[in-house]
Every structure is written in structure tokens, then in C-alpha cells.
Image (spheres, rainbow, N blue to C red):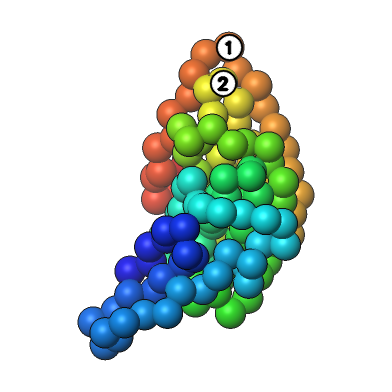
Amino acid sequence: VIVANQNGIYQVSHMSRTPAPIPFSNLFSSKVTNVRAMAVSASHQHIALLGDTGQLYLGSSDFATKYTEVQTNLTDPNTEITWCGIEAVVCSYGSTLMIVGRSGETVVYSYDGPLQLISEVDGV
């Protein structure tokens, strides 16, 4: 289980009694004080974290490998994020959809109305 609070990210398991936090400064290159959204890939091997400053962190779920960090400018608490397979994360706020690849490439789409993300086995 992975949880976050203002002190950082915690990996909680039945084996650990008092998990130590992973400070945000170990993950993000910019100042982040909390995580607004978190998504784990269907394979449980990858994690995405959206910081309060709009920084999007993509890395391995054990936090050993950082794939990329992208400034999304998405700071609203209603932003949704989800993995699309294992190669990209989809972010949605209002009528804007952003796709961020594991190597940092970004594509943004604007729609006429609000969006809601629904994860499926073969996509979003």
C-alpha cells in the first residue's frame, strides 16, 4: 500500500511496523508539499504522482527508478490521472486531456465539455 501526506510517500506493508517516509525532495526536482493525485499501473510496476505544483512524477512503484518528471501546470485538486498501459499516463481536468509518456513526451487535447477518465484493460 502506498499513501502520501505532507511528510512524503509511505510504503506500508504487513511486515513493517513503522514505515519511514520518502521525502518529496527525493522524488521531485521542484518544491512539492503534497500529492494531489496518485495512479499505479495495472501491472503494479509503475506509479505516477501529481504534486500540488503541477509536477508529474513517473517512476517504478518501488521508487528505485525515476522515468521522468514533467511540469503539467495542473494544480486543481479535481485533476484525474490514470495509466494507459505501461508507457503513458493520462491526465484530465475540465475539458483538457494531457497524455504524458514515460520518456517525458507530452500531447494536450482540448474538448468542448468536461471529461472523465475510465480505465479499461486495453486503454483509457
Secondary structure beneath dot 2 equals loop
Q: Is residue 78 above or below residue 44?
A: above
Task: Please tell me which residue is depicted at 30% across the width and 85% down the height of the picture.
Answer: 16
Q: Badge 2: few (under 14), some or many (20 or more) residues near its Cα, within 10 Å?
A: few
Q: Is residue 50 above or below residue 29?
A: above
Q: In the image shown, does 77 or 92 lie closer to the viewer?
A: 77
Amino acid on which the number 2 mark rests in the picture: Ser
Q: Badge 1: few (under 14), some or many (20 or more) residues near its Cα, within 10 Å?
A: few
Residue 8 is left or right of residue 102, and the answer is left
Residue 124 is left or right of residue 70, and the answer is left
Q: Is residue 16 above or below residue 59?
A: below
Amino acid on which the number 1 mark rests in the picture: Asp
Picture coordinates of residue 29 (x, y %)? Answer: 72, 62
Q: How many marks?
A: 2
Task: Please tell me which residue is depicted at 56% across the width and 54% down the height of the picture.
Answer: 33
Can you tell which quarter of the image residue 15 is in? Answer: bottom left
Picture coordinates of residue 44 (x, y %)? Answer: 42, 67
Which numbered circle lies on residue 60? none
Q: In the image shown, does 56 or 29 lie closer to the viewer?
A: 29
Task: Please tell me which residue is depicted at 66% across the width and 62% down the height of the picture.
Answer: 28
Is residue 115 something one can see in this rendering?
A: yes
Quadrant showing the N terminus: bottom left
Q: In the image shown, does 13 or 33 lie closer to the viewer?
A: 33
Task: Work out how far the residue at label 2 is from the one at label 1, CA to CA, in angstroms.
Answer: 6 Å
Is residue 101 something one can see in this rendering?
A: no
Give the mark nearest the N terminus, 2 or 1: 2
Picture coordinates of residue 61 (x, y %)? Answer: 49, 71
Which numbered circle lies on residue 95? 2
Can you tell which quarter of the image residue 11 is in? Answer: bottom left
Q: In the image shown, does 72 or 106 lie closer to the viewer?
A: 72
Question: On the image, numbered disc 1 is attached to which residue?
Answer: 112
Q: Is residue 3 above or below residue 123?
A: below
